[in-house]
Amino acid sequence: MRKKVRIIILLFWAVCLWCGTKASASAESLPFYEDGDVVGVMGDSITHVVYSKLSYVELLEEYYLSRFPGQKTEFRNLGTAGYKAVDVLNIYDKDPALQGINKAVIMLGTNEAVLGISTEEYIGNMGELVTRLKGDGLDGEDILILTPPICDENCRVNRDKNGKTRWAFEDTLLEYIEALEVKAQEWGVRYLDIHTPMAELTEELQSAEAGSTLTTDGIHPNAVGQRLIAYYILQAQGVGEEPLTEVFIPKEGEIQVCRGEVSDFYRGEKGLCWTWRPETLPVAGASGAQQFRSLFEKADLPYQNLLQVEGLPEETSYRVLMGETEPGSYTGSALAEGIDLGRLEGHPQQEAMGQVDALSKARHQNLITYRNMWIEIAMQRTTYVPEEVQAQYESWRAEDNRLRNEIYAIAEGLQGGVFRMAVIEEGSSPEELEQEAEAAKRAEEEARKAAEEQAAREEEAARKAAEEQAAREEEEAARKAAEEQKRREEEAAREAAEEAAREEAEAQALLQKRILLGTGMGVLVIWLAVWARRQKRQNKGS
């Protein structure tokens, strides 16, 4: 009993401190993996994970399945217990599972540190592995290098029966990490330090309770440690600032929704109801994390499906319904703080996601069998000809494909689910609330129709008034146009008359000029004739 209490205390502190150190894992922002990506995760026993039912690789894949239910992203676990970077290089061209990946995650270094391999040799082998991956078509941005996790030299489980420390190579790991960070930049690959935040968290744990640990034996991360590795990777991809899904219903104002859609909302005296269309699924394996999560309800965990309702009486108890199921009952104060629907057994999709979790664990067991072959090969305990390796690979691959296709089929079947949600005061029936909602909806619809009809009448009246005004304006414009036309015609006639008078006057003047000219010419002719006669008579007399 005392041991169980210590475990619960440890987990409680881990969750609290985890939430307080979420920003500690350092890395540039990592993009999410996309539909069709095959992410090869290379590592040692910490990735292979035969010592625990929980693997950070499995946790990553389950999160992606929930966050992106229509996306098929394969996380291919290539971890092999006892492996070093040089061992991965030795089987690189022999293991068919290493082929076909287009993204890579590498976490190696623990076994090198155990054996006291120099930093130069470790870095050299890591650099050659990066080169091999690039040679197979991966860009630097497709490769993520994780630092090896901690060697917890101070925990109880790292002591033999005489109190002697079993493992003590933390200083070597720190040397590796210092060089690895510099080289990762030179190699042009992505880099994520998970060691530092785990070490800081371990120090905090042990200051609260000496000997506490995030490992099973000082080296291998326990369930909390495996969750932390997955979380640090997801955090670097932008997860953690908001839950998986969320419906926040304030006392007043608009409903706030994260990854989903709310419609047909109604708030009455006895409760609330609405239609919820989430874009995500509850996380597979949520039941396995029940104890971990329930120890700290307010933890800002990335896989929460939050429902938060404000404005309800704090002490009043309310039933929460999702479709035909009833996940639980909560007080108004608990609903105001927020509840995580995804972890409730009554979630209508939880049973199917439980099947996904079982299939994921079957996938992992199937993987362990295949990866164990490569341990035997590395240890030279067994030899396999290429045909035997290929047969083992094809057997593993066929079963892995079958299990993954079952998982995808379940996710696709759940995708696009629509739920009629309700938060109902204890003692009230959902039927009554729905009747109220329906009546309110009808009243709202009638009011909407009445408003539309009134608006239509007003619009028609406005249209008629506009038409009449337009007709008046058209008539006035026609009258003005006629007056203007008449004015222009009168002006033209006046101008024509004036022009005719001018022409007549000019003609008269011209005629008068001609008459005067003719008269003058006649007088001149007569005068000349008289003058000529006189001259003639004068000439005769002389």
Image (cartoon, grey):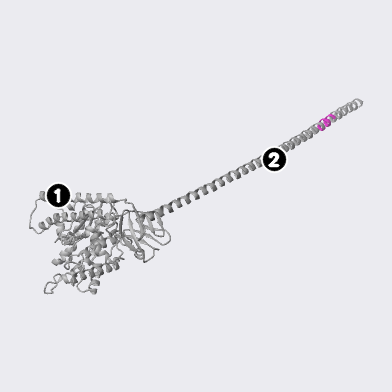
Vertical side of 194 occupied by 280: above or below: above
The image quarter containing residue 282 is bottom left
- x then y, percent, for residue 71: 28, 51
Magenta segment includes 493: no
The image quarter containing residue 11 is bottom left
In this view, the residue in front, 523 or 251, is 251
- Residue at mark 2: 487
**Residue sitting farthest toward the top:** 540
- x then y, percent, for residue 513: 80, 33
In this view, the residue in front, 263 or 384, is 263
Task: Specify the amino acid type for callout 2.
Answer: Arg
- x then y, percent, for residue 411: 27, 51
- Element at label 2: helix
- The quadrant of the rendering that contains the C terminus is top right
In this view, the residue in front, 68 or 125, is 68
- Residue at mark 1: 395
**Residue sitting farthest toward the front:** 427
Q: Residue at x 82, y 33 (%)?
A: 516
Q: Give the main secondary structure, helix, strand or loop, of the magenta stretch.
A: helix
| Residue range highlighted in magenta | 516-522
Magenta segment includes 519: yes
- x then y, percent, for residue 144: 24, 59
Number of the label disc, if any, that sits on residue 42: none
Using the rendered image of the protein, determine whether residue 457 is visible from the camera's viewpoint: yes
The image quarter containing residue 46 is bottom left
Kindly report the distance in space between the C-alpha atoms of the residues bearing marks 2 and 1: 103 Å
Which badge, 2 or 1, comes first in the chain's sequence? 1
